[in-house]
Image: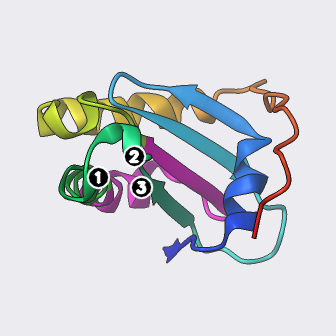
Amino acid sequence: MRVLRKRSQFLALNRQIRVSAKSFMLQARDRDDDDPTIGVGFTCSKKVGNAVARNRAKRRLREATRLVLPDLGRAGWDYALIGWQDSTADRPFADLLGDLRDALAKAHAPGRRPNPAPASPPRRR
């Protein structure tokens, strides 16, 4: 697995498959390249809480993906997990793992099509 770090990688995911779970949002896309690695990224907005709360939520998401993604993730795909206010940090860990399994199953369901996403505004510098 490789970690997604660049904004362009997250923007590419935003225009593809989105699945809402009880404790996070999963975004997924097939890269259509020859690289067999699985890309994964994590993000939490300031709505989740202060830095301590955001980091706790991201740590829980990282551990969940470490346990689930090698078995249920697909080679050549990128995934982003977006933490939600209250539910990501407070949900029991076993339920968080179940949410991730269910979200991956929905993302890889036959006939699943990418969601059209609105164009993002230009980034200010």
User: Looking at the figure, which quarter contains the C terminus?
Assistant: bottom right
10 Å neighbourhood of mark 3: few (<14), some, or many (≥20)?
some
| Disc 1 residue crowd, few under 14, some 14–19, many 20+, Cα 10 Å | many
Which SS class for mark 1?
Answer: helix
The amino acid at mark 1 is: Arg
In terms of secondary structure, where does tag 2 sit? Answer: helix
Alpha carbon of mark 1 to alpha carbon of mark 3: how far? 21 Å
Label 2 or label 1, whichever comes before in sequence order: 2
Q: Secondary structure at mark 3?
A: helix
Q: Residue at x 85, y 29 (%)?
A: 116
In the figure, residue 59 lies in which quadrant? bottom left
Mark 2 vs mark 3, CA separation in Å:
26 Å
- The numbered disc on residue 54 is 1
Q: Position of residue 108 (x, y in %)?
A: 63, 35
Verify whether residue 39 appears in magenta. no
Mark before the other along the chain sequence, 1 or 3: 1
Q: Is residue 66 left or right of residue 10?
A: left
From the viewer's perspective, is the residue at label 1 or at label 3 nearer?
A: 1
Task: Give the foreground label among 2 and 3.
Answer: 2
Q: Residue furthest front?
A: 125
Amino acid, disc 2: Lys
Magenta-drawn segment:
62-82
Residue shown at the point (26%, 39%) measured from the top left:
97
| Residue position marked by numbered label 2 in the rendering | 46
Q: Is residue 54 left or right of residue 53?
A: right
Q: Is residue 32 left or right of residue 68?
A: right
Are dots 2 and 1 in contact, CB under 8 Å? yes
Instruction: Look at mark 3 in the image and give the residue it sits on.
Output: 69
**Position of residue 21 measured from the top left corner of the image (x, y, whole percent):** 42, 25
- Image coords of residue 15 (percent x, y): 80, 42
**Amino acid carrying mark 3 in the image:** Leu
Question: At x 37% / y 34%, what residue is drawn?
Answer: 84
